[in-house]
Amino acid sequence: MASIGTPPFVALVDSYSTGNFLPPAFARLGVDAVHVQSTPELMPSMLGPDLGAYRGSFVSADADGFSATAAELASLDVRAVVAGQEPGVPLADALSERLGLATNGSALSRARRDKFEMIETLRAAGIRTARQFKSGDARSVAAWAEEHGTYPVVVKPLSSASTDHVFICDDAAATEAAARQVLAARDIFDLPNTEVLVQSFLAGTEYIVDTVSADGRAYVCGVWQYEKTVVGSGKRIYDRDVLLAPDAAPVPELIAYVRTVLDALGIRNGPAHAEVILTPEGPALVEIGARLNGNMNPAFHDLCLGTNQADLTALAYARPQEFLERHADGVYTKRQDAVVHNTRTIADGVVEAVDQNVVDKIASLPTVHLVSVKLAPGKRIRPTVDLLTSPLRIFMTGGDSAALRADHRAIQDLKDEVYVVRAGS
């Protein structure tokens, strides 16, 4: 590894999927990246890192924790250690702390990954949250829901993402069944669910609040409102993420709340992606990840926001003073209307082909910036029940809200023709 080039370097830990935007962002600032893998094998459920974008790569699997990895990075004069995706958060925290770099520290790492610990940490700080309980026994989860006294309740894994195995349950039987499904499954990061989380249902509209911090000062780089739709099972799934103006209600209230969450969870450096519900009592956290927004696309966000979370993250680590000076106002500017649309499907089978002509028709709609086709030929397509099973992600911007709505309607007439599907497994 010592011969890979000349510093400065950044180490990106578990840079799956959206984390692939980070190496070019650092490169634009003259910083090369090395990749650190926190598990012996790559996680099969996620789009792996593009190792061609790195000057070197190695696996942190040494028996004495991470000391060998820390020594390796120290020998390279690494200037920052950043989590590229959710599983890399604890190791990035530990390595950055050990090396004396900008860090969120390891003391609250578990609270930044385990959703039960996350909410308990906020509760201890006097911050509004859902009520909750966790157990490895499905009957105990159902018993808590009965004692809790108010349905619906939310059942989900402790440390997953992308609405993986999230259930909204209206009675004890449904709660126990959902808990059994969670406990029988592996999470999105291919880890077994040994416990399940049940929480009181937060009624209200849900929002995204994305931030990047340097030395405890957070810049809010976008607030989006979730619009959801109901599928045949009765489950509400994500349809459109709509960019809001920074001065539009309730954005200032959401931002003020998320700043208290960042402080309570010790997120002082790097990106964060928060999901918050505005309840009748005020904002309450669903969850927060100390990593990039999974819907982040640099070119798209540059158009509608003038910057993007990947470039902001690179600047915050590589040139923190410049980051603080350039973003001293602390809040983004909305340049134009924008939407991220996650399509749904009822198809069930194997993708035989992708009809590029249909993809091109969608891409040619006036407000469509990018069509992300998530399934290649040979992949399994299933009816949409969450973000993981949404077959297309479409980034839309320009025009006005009416133009975006018109193109959204047009997409509904085309989306089911994108994939040629062979029924069956």
Image (cartoon, rainbow, N blue to C red):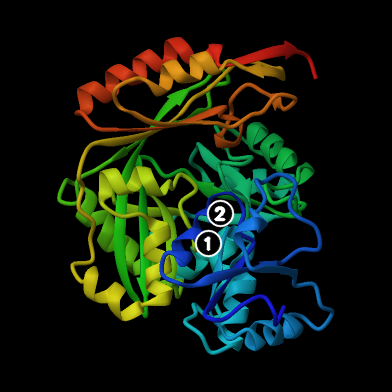
Quadrant location of the N terminus? Answer: bottom right
Q: Which residue is mark 2?
A: 20
What residue do we see at 52% from left, 80% from top?
Answer: 8
**Is residue 281 found left or right of 294 in the rendered image?**
left
416 above or below 128?
Answer: above
SS at mark 2 in the image: helix
Determine crowd level at label 2: few under 14, some 14-19, many 20+ residues with C-alpha closer than 10 A. many
Q: Which residue is mark 1?
A: 23
What residue do we see at 69% from left, 51% from top?
Answer: 189
**How many numbered tags mark residues here?**
2
Amino acid type, residue under disc 1 in the picture: Pro
Q: Is residue 263 visible?
A: no
389 above or below 23?
Answer: above
**Is residue 417 found left or right of 216 in the rendered image?**
right
Front one among 133 and 425:
425
Tell me where residue 311 sits by quadrant: bottom left
Front one among 287 and 325:
325
Determine crowd level at label 1: few under 14, some 14-19, many 20+ residues with C-alpha closer than 10 A. many
**Is residue 412 found left or right of 158 in the rendered image?**
left
Percent of width and height locating residue 178? 67, 37
Quadrant location of the C terminus? Answer: top right
Amino acid type, residue under disc 2 in the picture: Asn
Q: Is residue 405 visible?
A: yes
Q: Which mark is residue 306?
A: none
What residue do we see at 58% from left, 86% from top?
Answer: 77
404 above or below 287?
Answer: above
Percent of width and height locating residue 204? 34, 40
396 above or below 270?
Answer: above
Outermost left residue: 247
Percent of width and height locating residue 35? 65, 66
Q: Are marks 1 and 2 in contact (CB under 8 Å)?
A: yes
Tell me where residue 263 sits by quadrant: bottom left
